[in-house]
Amino acid sequence: MRSSCTSSGACRSRLERACRSRAWSVPLIALAICAISRASFAQSASGPTKEPRVEFWGAVTAGQTGPSGSIVSSYSPPLLLDGSDYTSHASQTVTFDGQSHAGFEAGANLFFARHGGLQLLFDRRSPEVEGTNGPYDVTLHYNSRVPPDNQAIPVTVNKSIPWPDTTGSITQSIFSVNGVLRVGTSSRIDATLSGGLSIQQLSGTVEQSGFTQYNLGGHSVLFENEYHLAMSLGPTSAVAVNLGGDLNVHVATHVALVFGARYFGGASVDMPVHVASVLNPEEITFTQTVADIERWMAPSPAQVHIGGWHVLAGLKLRP
């Protein structure tokens, strides 16, 4: 009986020690959980420990409008193969407006501080242009000398020719240097705002301008040659401004989707106009060279409005 009691006492002693051990372990575990939770909360609240100092991105762009303007012609159509005096005048205004288009944009942000830095930006688009034109007006006064007496008979030719719609395209290559501001860096979605100066390089082709050349043949027979011309615009450069912003949605450690919009604005520019080609050579009886046509026309520069805006979507890398 004594040994049984001794054994029971030993059991109680071991049980008491185990209970005391468990009593101490519960608060220790609770303290450990609290410490880990507090550290995790502090880390998530403080956001990323280090924002990227450099960002690169590429994006496709979409715009509703493009460069718009007009080519104004005013010249004296030549009367060839005859030495008699004549006067002539032709006038026309060919209008064009940029249409909806797609392009691309690429750039880099260099942050010298946590929220501010420098942006280098390149944008390129080639919108189609269209336009509705008024008539092409031509007037010619000359003296006709018909056999057998060859007496001078004054002749006047007046024509107002309905003209087809404008087609063509203008390419814009835009280089920008901007200041950039970064906000919302502690979340999965942040934003950048930027603006600065741009240099635009512009060139293009517009169809159709009109040119008329008269030839006076034997027995004072008048031949009229109506040219339809493709005209080249530029190249030319212009200084402009730009302003834009984008949202960045982080999808991986160093990768984000970027969505944004940008406006390019500036004063109208004068683009040099040159005769590029003859579109209807099969309809011309007495063909002239492009150089001669340009010499007679002496086309004035086209005034072109270069402002516009686009939206963009692309991918941003943050190494």
Image (cartoon, grey):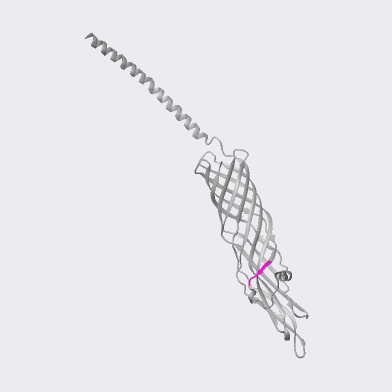
Instruction: Point out residue 199 in the picture as x, y percentages from the top left corner.
Output: 67, 52
Q: Is residue 61 above or below residue 213?
A: above
Instruction: Point out residue 308 in the picture as x, y percentages from the top left corner.
Output: 61, 56
Q: Which residues are magenta?
A: 275-279
Instruction: Point out residue 117 in the picture as x, y percentages from the top left corner.
Output: 62, 42
Q: Residue furthest left?
A: 1
Q: Residue furthest bottom?
A: 148
Q: Residue 86 or 124: which is nearer the viewer?
A: 124
Q: Quadrant where the C terminus lies?
A: top right
Left or right position of 190 against 37: right
Q: Quadrant where the N terminus lies?
A: top left
Q: Residue 141 or 22: which is nearer the viewer?
A: 22
Instruction: Point out residue 191 in the picture as x, y percentages from the top left corner.
Output: 55, 44
Write the residue at 52% across / 34% down.
46
Quarter of the image for residue 234 reads bottom right
Q: Is residue 20 above or below residue 297?
A: above
Write the residue at 70% across / 76% down.
213
Magenta-drawn stretch contains 264:
no
Left or right position of 20 against 128: left
Magenta-drawn stretch contains 278:
yes
Quarter of the image for residue 21 reads top left
How would you classify the magenta stretch by its main secondary structure?
Answer: strand
